[in-house]
Image (cartoon, helix red, strand yellow):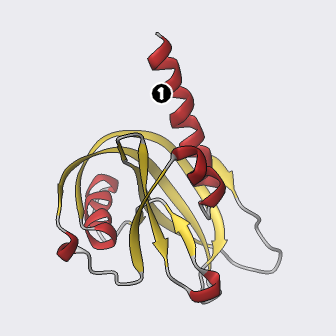
Amino acid sequence: MLQFGDCQSGLVYRDRPTAFGLLVDEGRLACVRVERGAGSYFDLPGGAVDGDETEAQALVREFIEETGLTVRPVSRLVEVAQYFRRTDGTPLNNRGGIWIAEQIAFDPAARVEADHELVWLDPVTALSRLRHEAHAWAVTSWLRQSTRATRA
């Protein structure tokens, strides 16, 4: 597993099982803009695995909650970890899969996280805007695989 982020001395980072997804439509990548005023940021859709959920189940739930998109997990692209601090300062280490997803449906009313907005970005633009290095690395890995597949 690749570990990203800086582990600051003196902080205890709680491991947090997660699942995030890459969904592409017409060449654009689904991202979420999380509204935090001056501290707003972009993430891949996804988040914590709750209770007895599998990563795939968490991915489906998180996509609906954050974007209103219903997706089907297609394949697990990579497993990564990311040290970071939540907006409230809590140190976490997100650990889990980043999945390729396929869109099944879209219902904007299904989105329940009011501070999350679905934004479609060119994948190269997303690389510079995504908050987590692990997410940017996954997008880069996916782009390289897609390019190789196109050339084959």
Q: Position of residue 102 (x, y in %)?
A: 27, 44
Image check: 34 left or right of 54? right
Residue 125 against residue 43 in the figure, above or below: above
Q: Can residue 8 be seen in this snapshot?
A: yes
Q: Residue furthest right?
A: 9
Q: Position of residue 14 (x, y in %)?
A: 58, 74
Image check: 11 left or right of 114? right
Q: Position of residue 38 (x, y in %)?
A: 64, 86
Which residue sits at x=69%, y=78%? 12
Amino acid found under the numbered disc labelled 1:
Ser
Residue 131 against residue 98 in the figure, above or below: below
Q: Can residue 1 be seen in this snapshot?
A: no
Which residue sits at x=53%, y=34%? 143
Q: Quadrant of residue 32?
A: bottom left
Image check: 63 left or right of 128? left
| Mark 1 secondary-structure assignment | helix
Which residue sits at x=59%, y=39%? 140
In front of the other: 54 or 128: 128
User: How many circles with numbers are drawn on the protein?
Assistant: 1
Q: Residue beneath label 1, please?
A: 146
Q: Residues within 10 Å of mark 1 (few under 14, many from 20)?
A: few
Which residue sits at x=74%, y=80%? 11
Q: Position of residue 26 (x, y in %)?
A: 35, 41
Residue 87 against residue 17 in the figure, above or below: below
Which quadrant does the N terminus fall into?
Answer: top right
